[in-house]
Amino acid sequence: MRRFDYASPATIDDALALLAGGDGAVRPLAGGTDLLTLMKADIATPERLIDIKRLAELDDAIALDADGLSIGALATLDDLEDDPLVRQLAPALAEAAAAAASPQLRNMATIGGNLLQRPRCWYFRSSLVHCWLKGGTECQARDGENALHALFDQSPCVAVHPSDLATALVALDASVRLRGPAGERSLSLGEFFAPPTDDRRTENVLAPDELILSVRIPPPADNARGTYLKAMDRKVWAFALVGVAATVARDGDRIGAARIVLGGVAQTPWRAREAEDLLVGQRPDADLFARAADAALAGAAPLADNGYKIPLARTLIRRALAAVTADGAPPA
Amino acid sequence: MATLRVAKPHDGEGDGEVQVVEGAAMSPWGPDAALAVVGKSHPRLEGPEKVTGRALYAYDVRLPRQLVARVLRSPYPHARVVRVDTSAAAALPGVHAVLSAEDAPEIPWYEDSRLFDRTVRFVGDEVAAVAAESVEVAEDALRLVRVEYEPLPFAATLEDVLRPDAPKLRPDGNLAGEPKTYRRGDPETALRAADVVVEGRYSTASALHNAMEPHGCTAAWEGEHLTLWDSTQSVFTVRQEVAEKLGLPEHRVRVIKQHMGGGFGAKQIAWKHDVIAALLSRRAGRPVQLMLDREAENLAAGNRNPTRQHVRLGARRDGTLTAIQARIEQATGAYQVGGEASNVSGMYQTLYRCPNVATEQVVLYTNTGPAVAFRAPGHVEAAFALEQAMDELARVLGLDPLELRRRNYAAEDQTEGKPYSLPEGLSLCYDRAAEAFGWDPAGSPAADGPKRRGVGFAAHDWAGGSGHPPGYAWVKLNADGTAEVVTGTQDIGTGARTGLAQVAAEELGLPLDRVALHLGDTATGPYSPVSSGSATQASIGPAVRAAAADAVAQLLAAASATMEVAADRLSVRGGRILVDGDLSRAVDVADVTQEIAPHMIRGQGERGPNPEDRAIRTFGAQCVEVEVDTETGEVTLLRVTTAHDCGRIVNPTLVDSQIIGGITQGIGFALTEERVVDGRLGLVLNPNLEEYKVPTVADVPPIEHAHVGVPDTVANPTGAKGIGEPPLIPTAPAIANAVFDAVGVRLRDAPLSRSRLLAALAAQGTDGEVRA
Ligand SMILES: Cc1cc2nc3c(=O)[nH]c(=O)nc-3n(C[C@H](O)[C@H](O)[C@H](O)COP(=O)(O)OP(=O)(O)OC[C@H]3O[C@@H](n4cnc5c(N)ncnc54)[C@H](O)[C@@H]3O)c2cc1C
Ligand code: SF4
């Protein structure tokens, strides 16, 4: 790891002042589970780290008010997994947190950092490859070893977003509250996550001098239920080959509203809008779920080695829909 | 009691080699021997040290003024090193020594290359090294080293190097040695005449050892004496090789290994880090620690050779094998580094009785890190193919796969015509595994929903476990009636310390807590061989027993004098010396040792040769049950039952530990472990524990060990053979066979990844996917 300076300011304003103008050379440090790994591998080379764990106004609180559930940026994955409010109001998030990483990591990893973690693409993570996402000119994965890569083409990069939480949170219609030099703003996660572009080689629109303060999940609709399913190469401690978060609100014996979001298939959490449209107003049954699953994957453009993700995603979609519409399942 | 007879053959006789004959005949502990300590579970003697973090591993060594070293590794799969400029690195404050091809001594290494060669042959090959006051300074220094490379054409994968237009990686081509061929009978004719032929092309991925403790050492000089605390499976091999490389006499090199976090075959030799650390330490005049990080470990410190195997079996309708043919291609990486060879063809020649067998094993260089032995090298790869082919044959013939194996039972080593030391060993494994598992090939429940269950069977033989004579041990009896056993072997994490102490306690007639066992130090212990080939207990157990017997004979002679009873009426048990077996007339061992103190009883023992007219093998059989989700390709192991002929079970807990560990690695080999190489870049993409997926506890099902435990009294006087490697050998094919049983697709490429399984299910139309 290269030398870096370390600061531990007391207030958000102090932290923002330290971040200002750093343009990426100054980075906030939360749990460090991704940032420090990238620094050890010489992929992130910040000159200065701003520890945000001691900021008075930034916390790990999970609270409920009229606008829904608010989760402080420092809440750990372990907090989310166990929190009664999250389990009750946003079970998809609790399930996603529980399915992520390992117990040791979940104790350190924060929700803010989780949304901002960088792709696990092995070319990206290799210090010997200067790929497009790192500012180079070529994506080595596109015609290389791409079994773990994207089904949906959004940019020159075909890495997938690694976060389980992000998939669940988009399905929960969550938003992030951000603060930068110009003050606060709120963005839905659908707007927050954005495929990298030539000018912005990151997976979201957070400015380098902005902080995530909290995540907000609106109150669930009546009769809404949600779940998160994840396929991994082994039983635990692996990133999603495919993750599926589904939330469905019932309207009598029909589906009133639905969100289906896929992880592991694109550079951002991937909303399957065609599938959602197809579900609304219909009576839930296996045939409908299968049609929804097909619709969700209809636009998939597999690379040489990742075609297996299509049947995998379809299956997880069908199973998630069956789970959230089955009679007797707990409401969410 | 030690006898060492050196015989020079008469002129014209033998091949002119000096024959050394030693080993006093001891009567073996037979099946009915009444043993008090051997055969009982006992926790590892060093267990408390390990679980409290006090046990010292190579990395834990901290000497005054110790420096830390880091190695600059090649970013190119193949290149000429034109120039290395280390001046800026050397000038960095905190840097105390730098080495590279520009100034390192020309020490021969790996075949015809050098310690720092002018040609680098894989990404990760050593280019330069620095010793500095901290890891950070060392890494900063490496970034200041300027290297000019001239890239050369490369071939990093087995597929690439087998292409007709593959670049020539060596002056003589890409073959690492002449192909190894073996032939008995006439397999071609037998195949033409066979009632049934099954044929398949199999492949196995390169697996990475990923021992918890990486390779590494700490080197310190005192004058002209070098001490190396190394993470190694063979302190004596490292001493001999390091002494040779550095031009030192052996008595000036001391190698120590007290505790080890695994080696799995990759730590049998002196690696470059040993000599680099020693050279840096000499230059800096300070101790130097050089540990590999996980990436270096996975790039440059060994891997299991990937293979491609083309297999043909011919049989009669009743299942009698008439022909076995196997053509094997395997990649040895950039260098052949020595240690135990990967004998992929061996199992084809020996596991089943068959008169017509031909194998051809072709070893190729590639521009990846050197392959080395990995827990049952060769046999793990071969079993994956042969045991699936046998399963396929059984199905074609409509036979129970176990019955097919029984019909082709080999009770002798057909390559040498020697009967096995325990000819019924494998048969006992079949019986015990099948019985404990409730083996029923028709027993999988009927298909119901997307999840299907299946059972699979696989067997193995293995030349390891027989011991590597010679090897030595000493026993000292202290004045207080305690004993110290000294041997030059090492405990590589298997619990050898405990198993050997049990043998000593047994023979000495002392309780285990009155025995200390010292090992892992060339300065204090007599020569012992490498801990490879599942050999430590089988190699050194008999030597320890002999040394203890020698000490007991001396003790009883002394007791005879102090007790005034004829020595042949005395015996030792539970720490007491009995007269005519009578406890009431017993005295404590300490009474005698104290009486003669400060004179000391010193026993010596050696490991005699293995029998010449018998072949010693270990055997095993495994049954597994799996559940396959046909829609997601997820394979879940439900249970594994395993039986092994490892001779006498000296300590059931330790044997169970080896079984759990071996099967766990087998599960990884079967389902998830695969070194991924980008052939275009010559780059290993997953040299880490995130994307190279070893199994977790959640992936390992209940494992049942069905004991065989028949002492192999022909093998050696303790009756114990090895168990380190065997449990891994049959796991992957047993899983693949169970997957076939569950869903009817034959996956001939390891690992059985989801992508492969889902593709095969889709091709077969049984992926169970519901489509609108
Ligand atoms: C072995 C391993 C396995 C994993 N498996 C999974 C998995 O299965 N599923 C999954 O979802 N994740 C997984 N992860 C990722 C893990 O969850 C993230 O690394 C973690 O959540 C990041 O949080 P952190 O607090 O450690 O962030 P840090 O590493 O401290 O920071 C990450 C990034 O976010 C920035 N940052 C952090 N907090 C803020 C903030 N409040 N405002 C602005 N910027 C901020 C940092 O500057 C940095 O750029 C795994 C990680 C590892 C190492
Ligand atoms: S997929 Fe993205 S991260 Fe991976 S190599 Fe291509 S550009 Fe780089």
Image: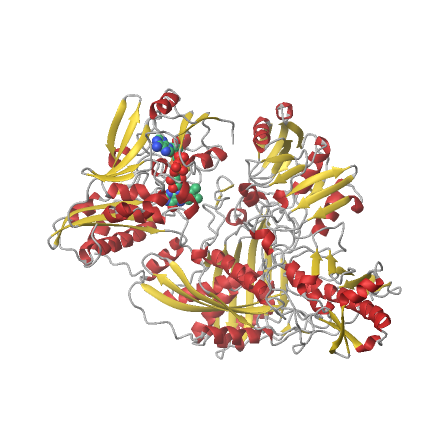
Question: In front: B207, or B273?
Answer: B273
From the viewer's perspective, is B171 left or right of A93? Answer: right
Of all residues, the one furthest to the front in this rendering is B584
Direction from residue B714 to residue A62 in the image, left or right? left
Horizontal relation, residue B296 to residue A229: left or right: right
| Percent of width and height locating residue B558 | 84, 68
Q: Evaluate whether residue B666 shows in this view.
A: yes
Figure quadrant, ligand 2 = top left
**Residue A330, image x, y percentages:** 22, 55
Return the residue found at the far right: B11
Q: In terms of image quadrants, where is residue B582?
A: bottom right
User: In the picture provided, is A320 more to the left or to the right than B286?
Assistant: left
Quarter of the image for the N terminus of chain B: give it. bottom right
State the quadrant of the C terminus of chain B: bottom left
Q: Residue at x 74, y 77 (%)?
A: B584
Counting from the top left corner in percent of width and height, residue B325 is at: 55, 66
Front residue of B658 and B584 = B584
**Residue A118 seen in this snapshot:** no
Please give the count of numbered marks on the rendered protein. Answer: 0
In x, y percent, where is residue A116? 35, 35
Compared to B481, does B306 lie above or below?
A: above
